[in-house]
Image (cartoon, rainbow, N blue to C red):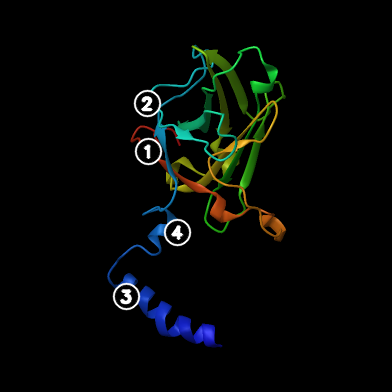
Amino acid sequence: MDQLGCVLANDVPEVKNMIRDKKPLFPEYTGLEPQGAVAHCISLKNVGWTGSEGTPPAGLQWQKCSYGPETNEIKWASVSDNNALYIWVSDETTCDQDTASQAITSIKIKIEPQRLYPARHFNYAPGNALKNNEFIHMNMTSGVRYAGVRIPFEKTGITTQNLHPVRIDVRVQKGKGEANSWRPNNPITSRLLLGEDNPADLGWLMFEHNPQQNNNP
């Protein structure tokens, strides 16, 4: 009762004033004014893989996967088109190119399509059969390993008509040892559909607006 009384006395009037002044509600929570880790997804009319030979497009904004072994120089970046979200991973770790233990063995991506929604998990491994237009590219260029995955928007719960900020994390596993991730991993007590995912472990992904992107609904 004390907590309810506090909400009625403080929170409700504050929200009422925000609505009256036509201010956005909870902008830090919805991503209009994101706080914490923020990544930016560039927009292209058609990403496609043809002719790319498994190399990422220019202009990506790379984020370091700083949680995990400090010896790994793993980064990730993203790009989107009308149909899909593409996640690229680069590994600039100095090592013997033929050492299997240094190869990227899996990429795990966690996306929360809406606040309070269960996060969707996407797991990829080289050589595994992928369905529904999902696939993974692997390549090495000038000593840098690249891996790219394609996730159709229809599987993410995000629509191109409303590319609002979403919460995300990228986790990269190499042949041996601990994985590297963009955000920390602090699972909590499992809660039905929400599982053990901790919303605090995710960062923001901000979509770049492209007027041409929604020409083909």
Going by the numbered disc 3, the residue's amino acid type is Asn
Q: CA distance from mark 4 to mark 3?
A: 18 Å
Residue assigned mark 3:
17
Residue assigned mark 1:
208
Label 3 vs label 2, nearer the camera: 2
Residue assigned mark 4:
29
Q: CA distance from mark 3 to mark 2?
A: 42 Å
Q: Quadrant of residue 177?
A: top right
| Res 103 visible | no
Going by the numbered disc 4, the residue's amino acid type is Tyr
Give the mark nearer the N terminus: 3 vs 1: 3
Q: CA distance from mark 3 to mark 1?
A: 31 Å
**Badges 3 and 2: C-beta atoms under 8 Å apart?**
no
Q: Nearer the viewer, residue 78 or 16?
A: 78
Going by the numbered disc 1, the residue's amino acid type is Glu
Residue assigned mark 2:
59
